[in-house]
Image (cartoon, rainbow, N blue to C red):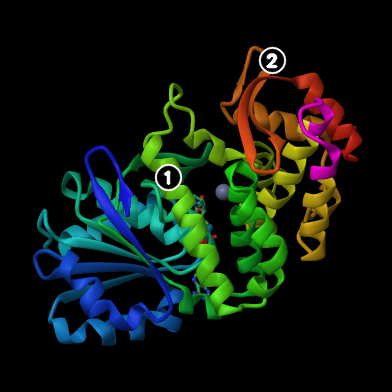
Amino acid sequence: PIQLAHHQYDILTGANLLERAASLLAPHISNNHAIIITDETVADLHLDTLEKALAPTHIRLDVLRIPAGEGSKSLPRYSALIEEILRLGIERSTTIIAFGGGVVGDLAGFIAATALRGLPFIQIPTTLLAQVDSSVGGKTGINASTGKNLIGAFWQPQLVLADSSVLQTLPRRQRVAGYAEIVKSGLIADPNLFAWCEQNGSKLLDGDSSALEEAVQRTCRFKAQVVAADERESAAKGGRALLNLGHTFAHAFEAEFHYDGRLLHGEAVSIGLHMALALSVQLGLAPIEDLERLDKHLTALSMPTTLADLPKRLSAATLIEHMTHDKKVQNGRVKFVLLRKIGEAFTSQEVTMEDINKLLSKEGCLT
Ligand code: NAD
Ligand code: ZN
């Protein structure tokens, strides 16, 4: 369960949940009409299972497919889709179901938040990243030409159905990307989860179903707690901001590669986690042994950890330029999530551009 001030919902995790959609989903679909938004890839692989499972319920299902990929989180796609939905003849109680990865979840969620000023919404995340991160917590949105996720709304689902079986068809590279967010959760506040990753990460990336199931469950539990304590990422509460560990660097890397598939979000996060801990060590806040431990774990799984793992070498000036645009810089200081040790993150307002420059040159950035 995830308990918010004005809303409560369940995250269901486990294997073969799609087959049980009639009993698990149907009670949450209020007026017998639901619109499934999915992408072409997920539709080809898994839509049949979902439709067959829901057939006995006689719920009217409309299915809208979008092209796979980040490019679909755009204003033109949003506009075309919402017009199409309105033409289908919907009511305030028609349910929107997001069936796909984070792209589908963010776009469908924003449609649910805005069509008729808000429709009931269900998330069926199908990537590891979506199951452990994007489907939980109510952030929805699309990209603007000036930046990622700049148009959006908080809109909480009625239910999240995270079926670990669908992750079997996920390419390993996508699994790695989702796994980075699991490691991140351990680093922020759960040293036991990090230790679990060290034991089970390799199995998980090979598609071991019980490892996937356990990781999804543990990470969702963690994110649900964080979101419950700080639903809207308020500056005063601050807990939710810790989820940005590694993301200031990650967003700067991603911006440079234009979200065109050369660098996945989770790959950028993997390097970003190393950078955040390296910065914490440089500032004398965290022990070097913890950095060595993180690097050892990530490299053992062939995950990217250094700037040399990026698709091309970048200059410090380029990265700092992107970070300055990331809204986290004020008066030459960057708001940064740092670590005291593995399992203990905090937000610092004290990091200077000099600190970042020093780190980037130490890490082999072009000057
Ligand atoms: P994605 O939705 O693009 O999915 C990645 C690829 O995997 C796509 O090609 C998709 O078609 C394919 N795919 C999906 N499920 C599959 C399956 N079961 N088997 C085989 N292929 C499958 O990307 P993502 O990594 O899931 O999500 C990234 C997006 O999530 C970004 O836009 C990011 O901004 C957003 N995000 C949002 C939040 C949030 O809190 N709302 C948090 C983190 C990330
Ligand atoms: Zn992330």
Residue sitting nearer the eye, 69 or 2: 2
Q: Position of residue 319 (x, y in %)?
A: 74, 35
Whichever of labels 1 and 2 marks the residue nearer the N terminus, that label is 1
Residue sitting nearer the eye, 350 or 52: 350
Q: Give above or below for 190 relative to 366.
A: below
Give the residue at x 42% y 73%: 14
Name the residue that disc number 1 marks: 225
Secondary structure at badge 1 equals: helix
Q: Which label was assigned to residue 209? A: none
Give the residue at x 11% y 53%: 92
Give the residue at x 23% y 81%: 54
Residue sitting nearer the eye, 292 or 149: 292
* Quadrant of the rendered image containing residue 97: bottom left
Q: Closer to us: mark 1 or mark 2?
A: 1
Q: Amino acid at mark 1?
A: Gln
Q: Is residue 89 visible?
A: yes
| Quarter of the image where the C terminus is located | top right
Name the residue that disc number 2 marks: 332
Quick one: which residue is furthest to the front in this view?
192
Q: Position of residue 192 (x, y in %)?
A: 62, 53
Q: Is residue 71 visible?
A: no
Contact flag, marks 1 and 2 (Cβ < 8 Å): no
Q: Position of residue 279 (x, y in %)?
A: 78, 32
Q: Give above or below for 320 relative to 36.
A: above
The CB of the residue at mark 1 lies under 8 Å from ligand 1: no
